[in-house]
Image (cartoon, grey):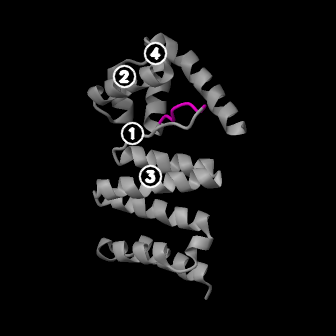
């Protein structure tokens, strides 16, 4: 078995094992000789480890692992993977700086709140549709206004279109 296959086997075992065994298996996979020759696989394993650490509420360790993962994917130019790692990093409680020239990424939930608010729904209607509290919806709107540079709900539709075009042009370059 190749070193890469052995490391990936350890990673798969970590992903499918009980939480009591996962930590040791992730560490073994990430430190396995030969995995350093495969930086994409190493970053994918580190992402899985960071997601697991967040799920078991080891947020400080998760943030450290995910920050390294974001850097690894950025170095490789694997932007979809880097964005996924950034989303996990945000979920772990870290503030994620955007790359130069790229708009701040919106979470899926923020995007949905923005679309519903742009369509004219009230905070209570959005909260009911998304099974959130009105306070959470208001918080998302507050963050959206800052991120998209708008001051009123009426500007959300145009701001989302502008955001999408900026995001598309950043991906193309």
- For image coordinates 43% across by 28% down, the residue present is 113
Residue 114 left/right relative to 130: right
Measure the alpha-carbon separation of dots 2 and 4: 16 Å
Which comes before the other along the chain, label 4 or label 1?
1
Residue on which the image places disc 3: 67
* Residue beneath disc 2: 142
Give, as a single range, the part of the protein colored magenta: 101-106
| Quadrant of the rendering where the C terminus is positioned | top right
Q: Sequence-wise, which precedes: disc 2 or disc 3? A: 3
Above or below residue 93? Residue 65 is below
Q: For mark 3, does the 10 Å Cα neighbourhood hold few (<14), some (14 to 19), or many (20 or more) residues?
A: many
Residue at disc 3, secondary structure: helix
Viewer-nearest residue: 136 or 94: 94
Say if 27 sits above or below 165 in the image.
below
Q: Earlier in the sequence, mark 2 or mark 1?
A: 1
Specify few, some or many for label 4: CA neighbours under 10 Å numbering under 14, 14-19, or 20 or more. some
Q: Position of residue 23 (x, y in %)?
A: 35, 72
Q: Which residue is mark 1?
A: 95
Q: Nearer the viewer, mark 2 or mark 3?
A: 3
């Amino acid at each position: 078995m190749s070193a890469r296959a052995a490391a990936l086997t350890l990673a798969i075992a970590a992903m499918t094992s009980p939480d009591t065994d996962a930590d040791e298996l992730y560490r073994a996979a990430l430190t396995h000789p030969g995995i350093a020759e495969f930086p994409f696989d190493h970053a994918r394993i580190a992402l899985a480890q960071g997601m697991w650490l967040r799920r078991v509420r080891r947020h400080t360790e998760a943030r450290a692992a995910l920050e390294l993962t974001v850097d690894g994917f950025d170095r490789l130019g694997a932007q979809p993977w880097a964005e996924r790692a950034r989303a996990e990093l945000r979920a772990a409680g870290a503030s994620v700086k955007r790359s130069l020239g790229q708009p701040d990424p919106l979470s899926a939930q923020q995007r949905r709140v923005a679309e519903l608010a742009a369509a004219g729904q009230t905070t209570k209607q959005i909260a009911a549709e998304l099974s959130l509290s009105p306070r959470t919806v208001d918080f998302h709107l507050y963050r959206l206004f800052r991120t998209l540079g708008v001051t009123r709900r009426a500007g959300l539709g145009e701001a989302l279109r502008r955001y999408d075009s900026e995001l598309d042009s950043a991906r193309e370059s």
